[in-house]
Amino acid sequence: MFLTISTTGSPERPATDLGFLLHKHPGKTQAFSTSHGTAHVFYPEATAQLCTAALLLEVDPVALVRRGQGKGRGGAPDAALAQYVNDRPYAASSLLAVALSGVFRSALKGRCTARPELAEQARPLRVEIPVLPARGGPELVHRLFDPLGWDLVQAEPVPLDERFPEWGDSRYVRLVLEGELKLADALRQLYVLLPVLDDAKHYWVAPDEVDKLLRAGDGWLAAHPENALISSRYLARHKRLTQDALERLELVRLAEADGSEVEELDNAVDENCDTQERPVPLAVHRRDAILAALRAAGAARVLDLGCGQGQLVQALLRDPAYTEIVGMDVSVRALNLAAKRLRLERMGERQSTRVRLLQGSLAYTDKRLAGYDAAVLSEVIEHLDPERLPALEYAVFGSARPRTVLVTTPNVEYNVRWESLPAGHVRHGDHRFEWTRAEFRAWAGEVARRHGYGVEFVPVGDDDPEVGPPTQMAFFTAADHTDHTDHSTRTGRTDGTDRTPKEGEAA
Ligand code: SAH
Protein backbone atom coordinates (compact mmCIF):
# COMPACT_ATOMS: atom_id res chain seq x y z
CA MET A 1 0.00 0.00 0.00
CA PHE A 2 1.57 3.14 -1.16
CA LEU A 3 0.55 6.75 -1.42
CA THR A 4 2.44 9.91 -2.24
CA ILE A 5 1.49 13.51 -1.63
CA SER A 6 3.43 16.18 -3.48
CA THR A 7 3.38 19.92 -3.55
CA THR A 8 5.24 22.52 -5.52
CA GLY A 9 6.63 25.77 -4.18
CA SER A 10 8.91 28.71 -4.53
CA PRO A 11 11.70 30.22 -2.39
CA GLU A 12 9.05 32.35 -0.61
CA ARG A 13 6.64 29.51 -0.13
CA PRO A 14 8.85 26.44 -0.14
CA ALA A 15 7.37 23.08 -0.99
CA THR A 16 9.12 21.63 2.06
CA ASP A 17 6.45 23.33 4.19
CA LEU A 18 4.71 20.04 3.57
CA GLY A 19 6.94 18.69 6.35
CA PHE A 20 5.40 21.14 8.83
CA LEU A 21 1.92 20.34 7.62
CA LEU A 22 2.40 16.62 8.00
CA HIS A 23 4.37 16.96 11.22
CA LYS A 24 7.05 14.78 9.62
CA HIS A 25 10.54 16.03 8.94
CA PRO A 26 11.54 15.82 5.26
CA GLY A 27 15.06 14.78 6.17
CA LYS A 28 14.05 11.66 8.06
CA THR A 29 12.62 8.27 7.33
CA GLN A 30 10.23 7.32 10.08
CA ALA A 31 8.38 4.15 10.92
CA PHE A 32 5.18 3.82 12.92
CA SER A 33 3.56 0.68 14.06
CA THR A 34 -0.15 0.48 13.25
CA SER A 35 -2.63 -2.24 14.03
CA HIS A 36 -2.10 -3.76 10.59
CA GLY A 37 1.62 -3.46 10.19
CA THR A 38 4.31 -0.87 9.92
CA ALA A 39 3.77 2.47 8.24
CA HIS A 40 6.83 4.22 6.83
CA VAL A 41 6.95 7.91 6.01
CA PHE A 42 9.75 9.23 3.85
CA TYR A 43 10.39 11.95 1.33
CA PRO A 44 11.72 10.77 -2.07
CA GLU A 45 12.08 14.44 -2.98
CA ALA A 46 12.37 17.50 -0.76
CA THR A 47 13.34 20.82 -2.33
CA ALA A 48 11.80 24.28 -2.24
CA GLN A 49 10.37 23.61 -5.71
CA LEU A 50 9.02 20.10 -5.23
CA CYS A 51 8.41 18.07 -2.14
CA THR A 52 6.92 14.58 -2.06
CA ALA A 53 5.95 12.68 1.04
CA ALA A 54 5.39 8.95 0.74
CA LEU A 55 3.39 6.72 3.03
CA LEU A 56 4.15 3.05 2.69
CA LEU A 57 2.17 0.54 4.67
CA GLU A 58 3.87 -2.75 5.15
CA VAL A 59 1.04 -5.14 5.78
CA ASP A 60 3.05 -8.31 5.49
CA PRO A 61 6.70 -7.66 6.36
CA VAL A 62 7.93 -11.11 5.40
CA ALA A 63 6.65 -10.81 1.87
CA LEU A 64 8.06 -7.32 1.55
CA VAL A 65 11.49 -8.37 2.72
CA ARG A 66 11.47 -11.27 0.24
CA ARG A 67 10.86 -8.75 -2.50
CA GLY A 68 13.76 -6.63 -1.34
CA GLN A 69 11.55 -3.74 -0.28
CA GLY A 70 13.32 -3.45 3.04
CA LYS A 71 16.58 -2.41 1.36
CA GLY A 72 15.14 0.77 -0.11
CA ARG A 73 14.60 1.08 -3.81
CA GLY A 74 15.35 4.65 -4.65
CA GLY A 75 13.07 6.37 -7.13
CA ALA A 76 10.34 3.94 -8.16
CA PRO A 77 9.01 1.85 -5.36
CA ASP A 78 5.60 1.42 -6.91
CA ALA A 79 6.32 -1.19 -9.56
CA ALA A 80 7.24 -3.90 -7.10
CA LEU A 81 4.56 -2.73 -4.78
CA ALA A 82 1.91 -2.96 -7.48
CA GLN A 83 2.87 -6.59 -7.82
CA TYR A 84 2.69 -7.02 -4.10
CA VAL A 85 -0.76 -5.54 -3.78
CA ASN A 86 -2.07 -7.38 -6.79
CA ASP A 87 -0.87 -10.58 -5.22
CA ARG A 88 -2.76 -9.91 -2.06
CA PRO A 89 -6.15 -8.40 -2.58
CA TYR A 90 -6.91 -8.71 1.12
CA ALA A 91 -4.31 -6.08 1.85
CA ALA A 92 -6.87 -3.49 1.03
CA SER A 93 -6.82 0.26 1.04
CA SER A 94 -9.07 0.62 4.07
CA LEU A 95 -5.89 -0.31 5.95
CA LEU A 96 -4.09 2.53 4.25
CA ALA A 97 -6.83 4.91 5.38
CA VAL A 98 -6.43 3.70 8.95
CA ALA A 99 -2.67 4.20 8.72
CA LEU A 100 -3.21 7.64 7.17
CA SER A 101 -5.36 8.74 10.08
CA GLY A 102 -2.88 7.37 12.61
CA VAL A 103 0.31 8.69 11.10
CA PHE A 104 -1.04 12.07 9.95
CA ARG A 105 -3.50 12.63 12.76
CA SER A 106 -2.82 16.33 13.33
CA ALA A 107 -2.67 17.06 9.62
CA LEU A 108 -6.04 15.39 9.15
CA LYS A 109 -7.48 17.62 11.83
CA GLY A 110 -6.04 20.67 10.10
CA ARG A 111 -3.58 21.43 12.91
CA CYS A 112 -0.11 22.70 12.29
CA THR A 113 1.65 23.38 15.57
CA ALA A 114 4.80 24.96 14.22
CA ARG A 115 3.15 27.11 11.54
CA PRO A 116 -0.61 27.34 12.22
CA GLU A 117 -1.21 29.64 9.25
CA LEU A 118 -0.03 26.93 6.82
CA ALA A 119 -2.94 24.65 7.68
CA GLU A 120 -5.38 27.35 6.64
CA GLN A 121 -3.93 27.72 3.16
CA ALA A 122 -4.81 25.81 0.04
CA ARG A 123 -1.73 24.79 -1.92
CA PRO A 124 -1.01 22.90 -5.12
CA LEU A 125 -1.26 19.23 -4.27
CA ARG A 126 -0.71 16.04 -6.19
CA VAL A 127 -1.81 12.76 -4.68
CA GLU A 128 -0.86 9.51 -6.29
CA ILE A 129 -1.87 6.01 -5.33
CA PRO A 130 -0.31 3.62 -7.84
CA VAL A 131 -2.54 0.69 -6.96
CA LEU A 132 -5.90 1.44 -5.48
CA PRO A 133 -8.58 -1.22 -5.12
CA ALA A 134 -11.65 0.38 -6.71
CA ARG A 135 -14.88 -1.55 -6.75
CA GLY A 136 -16.91 0.36 -9.31
CA GLY A 137 -13.84 1.12 -11.42
CA PRO A 138 -12.59 4.41 -12.84
CA GLU A 139 -16.15 5.57 -13.41
CA LEU A 140 -16.94 5.49 -9.69
CA VAL A 141 -13.61 7.11 -8.85
CA HIS A 142 -14.70 10.06 -10.98
CA ARG A 143 -18.13 10.24 -9.41
CA LEU A 144 -16.49 10.36 -5.99
CA PHE A 145 -13.60 12.77 -6.62
CA ASP A 146 -14.87 15.00 -9.44
CA PRO A 147 -17.21 17.04 -7.18
CA LEU A 148 -14.44 17.71 -4.65
CA GLY A 149 -12.57 20.59 -6.22
CA TRP A 150 -9.65 18.81 -7.92
CA ASP A 151 -8.46 20.14 -11.29
CA LEU A 152 -7.42 16.69 -12.40
CA VAL A 153 -8.83 13.32 -11.42
CA GLN A 154 -7.18 10.46 -13.21
CA ALA A 155 -8.09 6.83 -12.69
CA GLU A 156 -6.36 4.41 -15.00
CA PRO A 157 -7.31 0.77 -14.76
CA VAL A 158 -4.39 -1.46 -13.85
CA PRO A 159 -4.22 -4.51 -16.17
CA LEU A 160 -4.43 -7.91 -14.51
CA ASP A 161 -1.08 -8.80 -16.00
CA GLU A 162 0.88 -6.51 -18.27
CA ARG A 163 2.28 -9.49 -20.19
CA PHE A 164 -1.24 -10.63 -21.12
CA PRO A 165 -3.33 -7.58 -21.99
CA GLU A 166 -6.08 -9.87 -23.27
CA TRP A 167 -6.78 -10.86 -19.65
CA GLY A 168 -8.30 -7.41 -19.14
CA ASP A 169 -8.16 -5.12 -16.17
CA SER A 170 -7.85 -5.86 -12.49
CA ARG A 171 -10.04 -4.23 -9.90
CA TYR A 172 -7.26 -1.74 -9.23
CA VAL A 173 -6.73 1.71 -10.61
CA ARG A 174 -3.83 4.10 -10.56
CA LEU A 175 -5.23 7.25 -8.98
CA VAL A 176 -3.83 10.73 -9.52
CA LEU A 177 -5.42 13.84 -8.07
CA GLU A 178 -4.16 17.35 -8.73
CA GLY A 179 -5.53 20.62 -7.52
CA GLU A 180 -5.28 23.53 -5.11
CA LEU A 181 -6.66 22.29 -1.80
CA LYS A 182 -5.98 22.50 1.88
CA LEU A 183 -3.98 19.46 2.87
CA ALA A 184 -6.42 18.57 5.66
CA ASP A 185 -9.31 18.54 3.20
CA ALA A 186 -7.45 16.25 0.84
CA LEU A 187 -6.50 13.87 3.65
CA ARG A 188 -10.04 13.74 5.03
CA GLN A 189 -11.42 12.93 1.58
CA LEU A 190 -8.92 10.10 1.22
CA TYR A 191 -9.61 8.84 4.71
CA VAL A 192 -13.26 8.33 3.79
CA LEU A 193 -13.06 7.51 0.09
CA LEU A 194 -10.27 4.91 0.12
CA PRO A 195 -12.32 2.46 2.16
CA VAL A 196 -15.41 3.40 0.14
CA LEU A 197 -13.64 2.41 -3.08
CA ASP A 198 -12.17 -0.65 -1.47
CA ASP A 199 -15.62 -1.62 -0.20
CA ALA A 200 -14.19 -4.21 2.15
CA LYS A 201 -13.76 -2.67 5.54
CA HIS A 202 -11.26 -4.51 7.63
CA TYR A 203 -12.28 -3.30 11.00
CA TRP A 204 -15.33 -3.56 13.15
CA VAL A 205 -18.04 -1.07 12.30
CA ALA A 206 -19.12 0.41 15.61
CA PRO A 207 -21.86 3.00 16.20
CA ASP A 208 -19.21 5.72 16.63
CA GLU A 209 -18.20 5.05 13.02
CA VAL A 210 -20.98 7.47 12.09
CA ASP A 211 -19.35 10.18 14.18
CA LYS A 212 -16.00 9.47 12.53
CA LEU A 213 -17.61 9.68 9.10
CA LEU A 214 -19.27 12.98 9.90
CA ARG A 215 -16.07 14.42 11.33
CA ALA A 216 -14.00 13.38 8.35
CA GLY A 217 -16.78 14.48 6.00
CA ASP A 218 -16.96 17.93 7.52
CA GLY A 219 -17.19 20.55 4.79
CA TRP A 220 -17.53 18.21 1.81
CA LEU A 221 -19.71 15.18 2.44
CA ALA A 222 -23.09 16.73 3.22
CA ALA A 223 -23.40 18.32 -0.20
CA HIS A 224 -21.69 15.51 -2.13
CA PRO A 225 -24.07 14.05 -4.74
CA GLU A 226 -22.90 10.53 -3.85
CA ASN A 227 -23.22 10.89 -0.10
CA ALA A 228 -25.69 8.01 0.12
CA LEU A 229 -23.32 5.59 -1.59
CA ILE A 230 -20.37 6.93 0.38
CA SER A 231 -22.13 6.55 3.72
CA SER A 232 -23.48 3.12 2.94
CA ARG A 233 -20.14 1.71 1.83
CA TYR A 234 -18.13 3.47 4.51
CA LEU A 235 -20.44 1.96 7.12
CA ALA A 236 -20.08 -1.50 5.57
CA ARG A 237 -23.69 -1.30 4.36
CA HIS A 238 -25.03 -1.27 7.89
CA LYS A 239 -28.52 0.06 7.22
CA ARG A 240 -29.32 1.73 10.50
CA LEU A 241 -25.98 3.44 10.77
CA THR A 242 -26.20 4.56 7.16
CA GLN A 243 -29.58 6.06 7.71
CA ASP A 244 -28.41 7.76 10.86
CA ALA A 245 -25.51 9.23 8.91
CA LEU A 246 -27.73 10.39 6.06
CA GLU A 247 -30.21 12.06 8.33
CA ARG A 248 -27.44 13.86 10.15
CA LEU A 249 -25.81 14.86 6.87
CA GLU A 250 -29.13 16.17 5.64
CA LEU A 251 -29.35 18.42 8.67
CA VAL A 252 -25.79 19.59 8.12
CA ARG A 253 -26.66 20.32 4.50
CA LEU A 254 -29.78 22.26 5.49
CA ALA A 255 -27.82 24.17 8.09
CA GLU A 256 -25.06 24.90 5.57
CA ALA A 257 -27.71 26.10 3.13
CA ASP A 258 -29.18 28.63 5.53
CA GLY A 259 -25.97 29.32 7.39
CA SER A 260 -27.31 28.38 10.81
CA GLU A 261 -25.41 26.65 13.57
CA VAL A 262 -24.71 23.05 12.65
CA GLU A 263 -23.66 21.80 16.03
CA GLU A 264 -27.03 22.14 17.67
CA LEU A 265 -28.98 20.55 14.86
CA ASP A 266 -26.45 17.82 14.61
CA ASN A 267 -27.14 16.69 18.14
CA ALA A 268 -30.86 16.78 17.70
CA VAL A 269 -31.21 13.78 15.43
CA ASP A 270 -30.03 10.30 15.47
CA GLU A 271 -31.37 7.04 14.39
CA ASN A 272 -34.77 5.62 13.85
CA CYS A 273 -36.29 2.42 12.81
CA ASP A 274 -37.13 2.79 9.15
CA THR A 275 -34.14 1.79 7.11
CA GLN A 276 -35.39 2.52 3.65
CA GLU A 277 -36.28 6.12 4.11
CA ARG A 278 -35.08 8.83 1.82
CA PRO A 279 -32.34 10.97 3.29
CA VAL A 280 -34.94 13.34 4.72
CA PRO A 281 -34.97 13.52 8.46
CA LEU A 282 -38.33 11.90 9.08
CA ALA A 283 -37.05 10.84 12.50
CA VAL A 284 -36.79 14.52 13.33
CA HIS A 285 -40.34 15.24 12.22
CA ARG A 286 -41.48 12.33 14.32
CA ARG A 287 -39.66 13.45 17.42
CA ASP A 288 -40.90 17.01 16.99
CA ALA A 289 -44.48 15.81 16.57
CA ILE A 290 -44.20 13.67 19.71
CA LEU A 291 -42.64 16.49 21.73
CA ALA A 292 -45.33 18.91 20.58
CA ALA A 293 -48.09 16.45 21.47
CA LEU A 294 -46.59 15.80 24.93
CA ARG A 295 -46.33 19.52 25.50
CA ALA A 296 -49.92 20.00 24.39
CA ALA A 297 -51.02 17.25 26.78
CA GLY A 298 -49.16 18.97 29.61
CA ALA A 299 -47.34 15.75 30.52
CA ALA A 300 -44.55 15.83 33.11
CA ARG A 301 -44.02 12.12 33.86
CA VAL A 302 -43.49 10.23 30.64
CA LEU A 303 -42.94 6.63 29.58
CA ASP A 304 -41.08 5.91 26.36
CA LEU A 305 -42.12 2.33 25.66
CA GLY A 306 -39.84 0.59 23.18
CA CYS A 307 -37.38 3.44 23.68
CA GLY A 308 -34.70 1.83 21.51
CA GLN A 309 -31.41 3.66 21.83
CA GLY A 310 -32.90 6.50 23.86
CA GLN A 311 -33.04 9.39 21.39
CA LEU A 312 -36.45 10.55 22.61
CA VAL A 313 -35.47 10.10 26.26
CA GLN A 314 -32.48 12.31 25.54
CA ALA A 315 -34.67 14.98 23.95
CA LEU A 316 -37.08 14.88 26.88
CA LEU A 317 -34.24 15.27 29.37
CA ARG A 318 -33.31 18.56 27.76
CA ASP A 319 -36.70 20.01 28.73
CA PRO A 320 -37.13 20.63 32.47
CA ALA A 321 -40.92 20.36 32.03
CA TYR A 322 -40.40 16.59 32.16
CA THR A 323 -39.80 15.63 35.75
CA GLU A 324 -39.72 11.87 35.34
CA ILE A 325 -38.75 10.02 32.19
CA VAL A 326 -38.74 6.26 31.92
CA GLY A 327 -37.42 4.44 28.88
CA MET A 328 -38.40 0.81 28.54
CA ASP A 329 -37.31 -1.70 25.98
CA VAL A 330 -37.19 -5.44 25.60
CA SER A 331 -33.71 -5.29 24.12
CA VAL A 332 -30.81 -5.15 26.57
CA ARG A 333 -28.51 -4.15 23.77
CA ALA A 334 -30.67 -1.14 22.91
CA LEU A 335 -30.80 -0.18 26.58
CA ASN A 336 -27.02 -0.38 26.90
CA LEU A 337 -26.66 1.92 23.93
CA ALA A 338 -29.27 4.24 25.42
CA ALA A 339 -27.37 4.34 28.72
CA LYS A 340 -24.21 5.21 26.83
CA ARG A 341 -25.94 7.89 24.79
CA LEU A 342 -27.39 9.47 27.92
CA ARG A 343 -24.10 9.09 29.80
CA LEU A 344 -26.11 7.67 32.70
CA GLU A 345 -22.94 6.71 34.55
CA ARG A 346 -21.59 10.22 34.59
CA MET A 347 -24.87 12.03 35.04
CA GLY A 348 -25.22 14.48 37.92
CA GLU A 349 -27.51 13.55 40.79
CA ARG A 350 -30.27 15.99 39.90
CA GLN A 351 -30.50 14.77 36.32
CA SER A 352 -30.24 11.13 37.25
CA THR A 353 -33.30 11.34 39.50
CA ARG A 354 -35.31 12.34 36.42
CA VAL A 355 -34.49 9.38 34.24
CA ARG A 356 -34.65 5.60 34.41
CA LEU A 357 -34.19 2.81 31.91
CA LEU A 358 -36.11 -0.42 32.41
CA GLN A 359 -36.00 -3.71 30.67
CA GLY A 360 -39.42 -5.12 30.04
CA SER A 361 -41.80 -6.40 27.44
CA LEU A 362 -44.96 -4.71 26.27
CA ALA A 363 -46.50 -8.11 25.84
CA TYR A 364 -46.95 -8.37 29.63
CA THR A 365 -48.66 -6.16 32.16
CA ASP A 366 -46.10 -4.40 34.28
CA LYS A 367 -46.89 -2.66 37.59
CA ARG A 368 -43.87 -0.38 37.19
CA LEU A 369 -45.65 1.41 34.36
CA ALA A 370 -48.69 2.57 36.36
CA GLY A 371 -49.37 6.18 37.26
CA TYR A 372 -47.68 8.17 34.48
CA ASP A 373 -49.05 11.17 32.60
CA ALA A 374 -48.18 9.91 29.17
CA ALA A 375 -46.77 6.94 27.28
CA VAL A 376 -45.12 7.09 23.89
CA LEU A 377 -44.90 4.09 21.56
CA SER A 378 -42.85 5.45 18.70
CA GLU A 379 -42.46 2.96 15.83
CA VAL A 380 -42.96 0.04 18.17
CA ILE A 381 -46.28 -1.71 17.49
CA GLU A 382 -45.19 -2.87 14.05
CA HIS A 383 -42.36 -4.83 15.71
CA LEU A 384 -44.82 -7.11 17.49
CA ASP A 385 -46.60 -10.03 15.89
CA PRO A 386 -50.23 -9.04 15.31
CA GLU A 387 -51.40 -11.73 17.72
CA ARG A 388 -49.39 -10.05 20.51
CA LEU A 389 -51.15 -6.72 19.99
CA PRO A 390 -54.10 -7.45 22.32
CA ALA A 391 -51.56 -8.14 25.09
CA LEU A 392 -49.79 -4.84 24.37
CA GLU A 393 -53.12 -3.09 24.24
CA TYR A 394 -54.06 -4.39 27.68
CA ALA A 395 -50.62 -3.70 29.17
CA VAL A 396 -50.72 -0.07 28.05
CA PHE A 397 -54.37 1.00 27.96
CA GLY A 398 -55.82 -1.42 30.51
CA SER A 399 -53.08 -1.75 33.12
CA ALA A 400 -50.58 1.16 32.92
CA ARG A 401 -53.35 3.51 31.82
CA PRO A 402 -51.59 6.84 31.44
CA ARG A 403 -53.75 9.85 30.67
CA THR A 404 -52.16 10.33 27.24
CA VAL A 405 -50.87 7.67 24.86
CA LEU A 406 -49.08 8.50 21.62
CA VAL A 407 -48.62 5.73 19.07
CA THR A 408 -46.73 6.21 15.81
CA THR A 409 -46.37 3.67 13.03
CA PRO A 410 -45.49 3.74 9.32
CA ASN A 411 -48.27 4.44 6.84
CA VAL A 412 -47.82 1.65 4.30
CA GLU A 413 -49.65 3.65 1.61
CA TYR A 414 -46.71 6.06 1.60
CA ASN A 415 -44.21 3.30 0.69
CA VAL A 416 -44.75 3.92 -3.03
CA ARG A 417 -43.11 7.31 -2.46
CA TRP A 418 -39.84 5.85 -1.15
CA GLU A 419 -37.69 5.66 -4.24
CA SER A 420 -35.53 2.83 -3.00
CA LEU A 421 -38.31 0.62 -1.69
CA PRO A 422 -39.33 -2.16 -4.08
CA ALA A 423 -43.09 -2.54 -4.47
CA GLY A 424 -44.73 -4.56 -1.73
CA HIS A 425 -41.81 -4.28 0.68
CA VAL A 426 -41.95 -3.02 4.25
CA ARG A 427 -39.50 -0.39 5.44
CA HIS A 428 -37.64 -2.50 7.94
CA GLY A 429 -36.78 -6.19 8.07
CA ASP A 430 -38.19 -6.48 11.56
CA HIS A 431 -41.59 -4.94 10.79
CA ARG A 432 -44.24 -7.62 11.27
CA PHE A 433 -46.82 -5.49 9.50
CA GLU A 434 -47.36 -2.02 8.13
CA TRP A 435 -50.81 -0.51 8.08
CA THR A 436 -52.80 1.75 5.80
CA ARG A 437 -54.36 4.80 7.38
CA ALA A 438 -57.72 3.01 7.48
CA GLU A 439 -56.24 -0.05 9.21
CA PHE A 440 -54.49 2.08 11.83
CA ARG A 441 -57.64 4.10 12.45
CA ALA A 442 -59.72 0.95 12.81
CA TRP A 443 -57.30 -0.54 15.34
CA ALA A 444 -56.86 2.67 17.32
CA GLY A 445 -60.60 3.38 17.29
CA GLU A 446 -61.34 -0.04 18.74
CA VAL A 447 -58.64 0.30 21.39
CA ALA A 448 -60.00 3.70 22.41
CA ARG A 449 -63.55 2.38 22.59
CA ARG A 450 -62.62 -0.68 24.64
CA HIS A 451 -60.56 1.25 27.19
CA GLY A 452 -62.38 4.54 27.47
CA TYR A 453 -60.04 6.83 25.55
CA GLY A 454 -60.69 9.48 22.94
CA VAL A 455 -58.40 9.34 19.88
CA GLU A 456 -57.30 11.74 17.18
CA PHE A 457 -54.93 11.21 14.29
CA VAL A 458 -51.94 13.31 13.42
CA PRO A 459 -50.01 13.09 10.15
CA VAL A 460 -46.22 13.21 10.59
CA GLY A 461 -43.95 14.31 7.76
CA ASP A 462 -45.04 15.47 4.34
CA ASP A 463 -48.79 14.75 4.08
CA ASP A 464 -49.20 13.54 0.51
CA PRO A 465 -52.64 14.34 -0.95
CA GLU A 466 -52.93 10.86 -2.41
CA VAL A 467 -51.17 8.45 -0.08
CA GLY A 468 -51.00 10.45 3.16
CA PRO A 469 -48.00 11.04 5.40
CA PRO A 470 -45.03 8.68 5.84
CA THR A 471 -45.75 8.29 9.56
CA GLN A 472 -49.12 8.24 11.25
CA MET A 473 -49.68 9.12 14.89
CA ALA A 474 -52.64 8.36 17.15
CA PHE A 475 -53.14 10.70 20.08
CA PHE A 476 -55.20 8.99 22.79
CA THR A 477 -56.59 10.80 25.82
CA ALA A 478 -58.27 8.99 28.70
CA ALA A 479 -61.92 9.94 28.87
CA ASP A 480 -62.06 9.71 32.65
CA HIS A 481 -59.31 12.24 33.11
CA THR A 482 -60.22 15.64 34.54
CA ASP A 483 -58.35 18.23 32.53
CA HIS A 484 -55.96 20.23 34.72
CA THR A 485 -53.81 21.24 31.82
CA ASP A 486 -52.74 24.80 31.30
CA HIS A 487 -54.58 25.49 28.08
CA SER A 488 -52.10 28.13 26.98
CA THR A 489 -49.72 25.28 26.15
CA ARG A 490 -52.25 23.84 23.74
CA THR A 491 -51.87 26.46 21.09
CA GLY A 492 -48.20 25.69 20.54
CA ARG A 493 -46.88 24.87 17.10
CA THR A 494 -47.05 21.17 16.35
CA ASP A 495 -44.14 20.66 14.01
CA GLY A 496 -44.85 18.25 11.26
CA THR A 497 -48.46 17.90 12.35
CA ASP A 498 -51.59 19.73 11.45
CA ARG A 499 -53.34 19.26 14.71
CA THR A 500 -53.65 21.15 17.94
CA PRO A 501 -55.69 19.20 20.45
CA LYS A 502 -59.08 20.72 20.95
CA GLU A 503 -60.65 21.95 24.14
CA GLY A 504 -62.74 19.41 25.93
CA GLU A 505 -61.59 16.50 23.79
CA ALA A 506 -60.93 14.51 26.91
CA ALA A 507 -64.45 14.86 28.24
N1 SAH B 1 -38.97 4.18 19.86
C1 SAH B 1 -37.74 4.18 19.11
C2 SAH B 1 -37.32 2.81 18.65
C3 SAH B 1 -38.24 2.13 17.69
S1 SAH B 1 -37.58 0.56 17.15
C4 SAH B 1 -37.84 5.14 17.94
O1 SAH B 1 -38.88 5.68 17.66
O2 SAH B 1 -36.81 5.36 17.28
C5 SAH B 1 -38.64 -0.55 18.02
C6 SAH B 1 -38.17 -0.82 19.44
O3 SAH B 1 -39.18 -1.58 20.08
C7 SAH B 1 -36.90 -1.64 19.49
O4 SAH B 1 -35.98 -0.99 20.32
C8 SAH B 1 -37.35 -2.96 20.08
O5 SAH B 1 -36.36 -3.55 20.90
C9 SAH B 1 -38.56 -2.55 20.88
N2 SAH B 1 -39.50 -3.64 21.12
C10 SAH B 1 -39.92 -4.58 20.24
N3 SAH B 1 -40.79 -5.41 20.83
C11 SAH B 1 -40.93 -5.00 22.11
C12 SAH B 1 -41.67 -5.46 23.24
N4 SAH B 1 -42.45 -6.53 23.14
N5 SAH B 1 -41.56 -4.80 24.39
C13 SAH B 1 -40.77 -3.70 24.49
N6 SAH B 1 -40.04 -3.23 23.47
C14 SAH B 1 -40.11 -3.86 22.29
Image: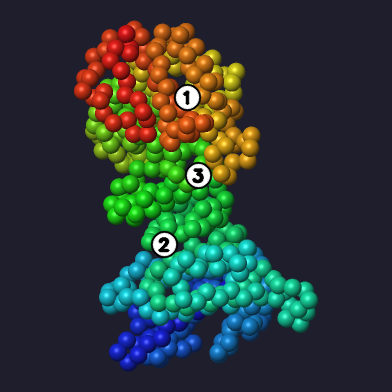
- In front of the other: label 2 or label 3? 3
Identity, as a three-letter code, of the amino acid under mark 1: Gly
Q: Does the Cβ of the disc 3 residue fall within 8 Å of ligand 1?
A: no
Q: CA distance from mark 2 to mark 3?
A: 20 Å
- In front of the other: label 3 or label 1? 3
Give residue 414's position: percent from left, percent from top: 53, 33
Q: Which residue is mark 3?
A: 278
- In front of the other: label 2 or label 1? 2
Q: Total label count?
A: 3
Tell me the element at label 1: loop
C-beta proximity under 8 Å, tags 2 and 1: no
Q: Which residue is mark 1?
A: 360
Q: What residue appears at the point 41 percent right and 16 percent down from the top-left corner?
A: 455
Identity, as a three-letter code, of the amino acid under mark 3: Arg
C-beta proximity under 8 Å, tags 3 and 1: no
Q: Which mark is residue 220?
A: 2
Q: Does the Cβ of the disc 1 residue fall within 8 Å of ligand 1?
A: yes
The disc, 2 or 1, on the residue closer to the chain's N-terminal end is 2
Q: Say which quarter of the image contains residue 321.
A: top left
Tell me the element at label 3: loop
In this rendering, the answer to whether 444 lies above or below 494 is above
Identity, as a three-letter code, of the amino acid under mark 2: Trp
Quadrant placement of the N terminus: bottom right
